[in-house]
Image (cartoon, helix red, strand yellow):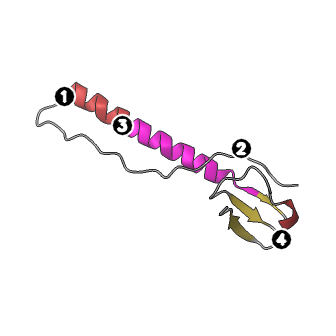
């Protein structure tokens, strides 16, 4: 039987545009900088969490419905990772 994970589409992450730091310390700048980094690392966590839950099973157990493009599946019969391309 195949291990299942929720079908969550992967969105590519992109490095955030960081604000330019003022010459003198600014609490407002530090807060804005931290918010931007927190959002970015949250995206990375979500992305890696989806990758960590790759489905696996035999060729006969490959999912056939409700797939998204880019969904990985480790085929234990072929001993290889296959990716749905639509």
* Vertical side of 16 occupied by 78: above or below: below
How far apart marks 2 and 1 lie (CA) works out to: 42 Å
How far apart marks 3 and 2 lie (CA) works out to: 27 Å
Looking at marks 3 and 2 on the same chain, the residue that comes earlier in the sequence is marked by 2
* Vertical side of 79 occupied by 36: above or below: above
How far apart marks 1 and 4 lie (CA) works out to: 58 Å
The reply to whether dot 1 and dot 4 touch (C-beta < 8 Å) is no
Numbered mark located on residue 15 in the image: none
The reply to whether dot 4 and dot 2 touch (C-beta < 8 Å) is no
Q: Which residue is mark 2?
A: 6
Q: Secondary structure at mark 4?
A: loop
Would you say 61 lies left or right of 32 here? right
Q: Which residue is at a point 74% across and 49% down the rendered structure image?
A: 66
Residue 41 locus on image (x, y percent): 45, 42
Looking at marks 1 and 4 on the same chain, the residue that comes earlier in the sequence is marked by 1
Q: Which residue is mark 4?
A: 77
């Amino acid at each position: 039987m195949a291990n299942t994970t929720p079908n969550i589409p992967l969105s590519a992450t992109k490095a955030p545009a960081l604000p330019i730091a003022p010459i003198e310390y600014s609490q407002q700048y530090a807060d804005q900088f931290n918010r931007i980094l927190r959002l970015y690392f949250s995206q990375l966590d979500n992305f890696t969490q989806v990758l960590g839950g790759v489905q696996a099973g035999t060729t006969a157990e490959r999912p056939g419905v409700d797939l998204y493009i880019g969904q990985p599946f480790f085929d234990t019969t072929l001993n290889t990772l296959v990716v749905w391309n639509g």
